[in-house]
Amino acid sequence: MLNAKKIRADFPFFKQKLKGKPLAYLDNAATTQKPRQVLDAMQEAYVARNANPYRGAYALAVEATEAYERAREKVADFIGAEPEEVIFTRNATDSLNIAANLVCASRKRGSTILLTEMEHHSNLVSWQLAAKRWGHRISYVKVKSDGHLCREDLEKKAGMSPLVFSFVHVSNVLGTVNNAKQLSQLAHENGSLACIDAAQSVPHMSVDVQKLNCDFLAFSGHKMLGPAGIGVLYMKKELQEEFEPLFGGGEMIKKVSLGGASWNDPPHKFEPGTPNLQGAVGLAAAIDYLMGIGMENVERHCQGLAAYCRKELEGIGAQLYGPVKGAGIVSFNVGNIHPHDVAHFADKEAVAIRSGHHCAQPLMNALGIAASCRASFYVYNDKEEVDRLASAVSRAAKALG
């Protein structure tokens, strides 16, 4: 296990107390806190390099451009991509919407999009809207009660050669870790594109797009110690030339006349307007911080806390969802007590957990529940915080029956 107390010293957020108690922040699947290294990098970018990248020949604009492109290279190295395959977006949701519309707009109407029942709304609604807009239909792979995809249903529906198979790498509800490499291979064997929602995997484990051999991959900066407002869409180089850009504006063009325009080289072709320099610099600093810890250590730490949490919650009678061994996410319910009430009891003890449908309502329906509680872990959490959660859950069970 990592030395979480030492790591927390890097996070100004944890200097505060809630109700006189140190805050146990266990909602990291939603967003993570930021170390001072990230905050300092962003502050420095605002104070010393606040110019519009690509737009000027003066020294400050050149420095801003170089800082932005260094951030792109950092991201590319982190996921095993080429820099030109890294497209900066607003977040994973934005990335998935771009991928969905690029694919659906460029293919013959009436094709099938294959998703799964365990998708976050980001990877559901984006494809639903694009499919409706461009005249396609959607099929879904079923989820079994143990939190894994139904292999028989998967092979049957993938075998029908859908246009694209878009799937989550790690479930934000169940912590299920799908074998993304095998799923991408299955998609390609059936003539389909492979798109991965990696919002929960890139922050928690080593992800290499070359090994996964996916066509698209999306993730957000704010779930991996970085700032909100910056995300990434990885797109294979050979696909970038094929697609027309979705949005027009400055920098994504090569030449403009009153009669039309020609496009800049990728990835700039897909990045219109003023870039989010501070967000990109902050994301690069977050990657540096995580690499300093080591992604294998991050993964081991979060999985260890999740395993310990499952054991403690099971010991007090909580109902657990998802596989026994998964990522650093634990979803549970306590009898007939509403998840919001359990979360309220935890909050009174300065323990922050998520309650609700977690932007995955179809998965809730498949599980036969309306909502659940969720504890999700990161590098600054420890077992003592899990103990505090278990104690609060136990009190909720006794008080509300």
Image: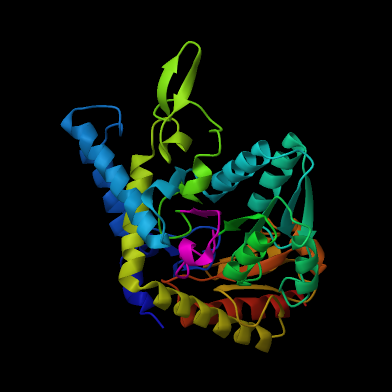
Q: Is residue 348 visible?
A: yes
Q: Quadrant location of residue 188?
A: bottom right
Residue 369: in sight, yes or no? no
Image quadrant holding the N terminus, namely bottom left
Q: Which image quarter: residue 186?
A: bottom right
Task: Please provide percent x and percent y for residue 291.
Answer: 33, 68
State the residue at coordinates (41%, 61%).
80
Q: Find the residue positioned furthest to the left.
A: 59
Task: Name the residue rendered at 71%, 74% in the picture.
Answer: 148
Residue nearest the viewer, comparing 27 with 100: 100
Q: Identify the magenta region.
A: 198-220
In this rendered view, identify the residue nearer to me: 91 or 196.
196
Q: In what quadrant of the picture does the C terminus appear?
A: bottom right
Q: Nearer the viewer, residue 100 or 339?
A: 100
Q: How is the image coloured?
A: rainbow
Task: State whether residue 238 is above or below residue 175.
Answer: above
Q: Seen from this angle, which residue lies furthest top?
A: 258
Say whether residue 207 is magenta: yes
Residue in the foreground of this view, choosing between 330 and 118: 118
Percent across and percent down for residue 251 are: 39, 29
141 to the left or right of 383: right
Residue 48, x across and y down, in percent: 20, 40
x%, y% of residue 41? 27, 51
Q: Quadrant of residue 108?
A: top right
Within the magenta stretch, is there residue 377?
no
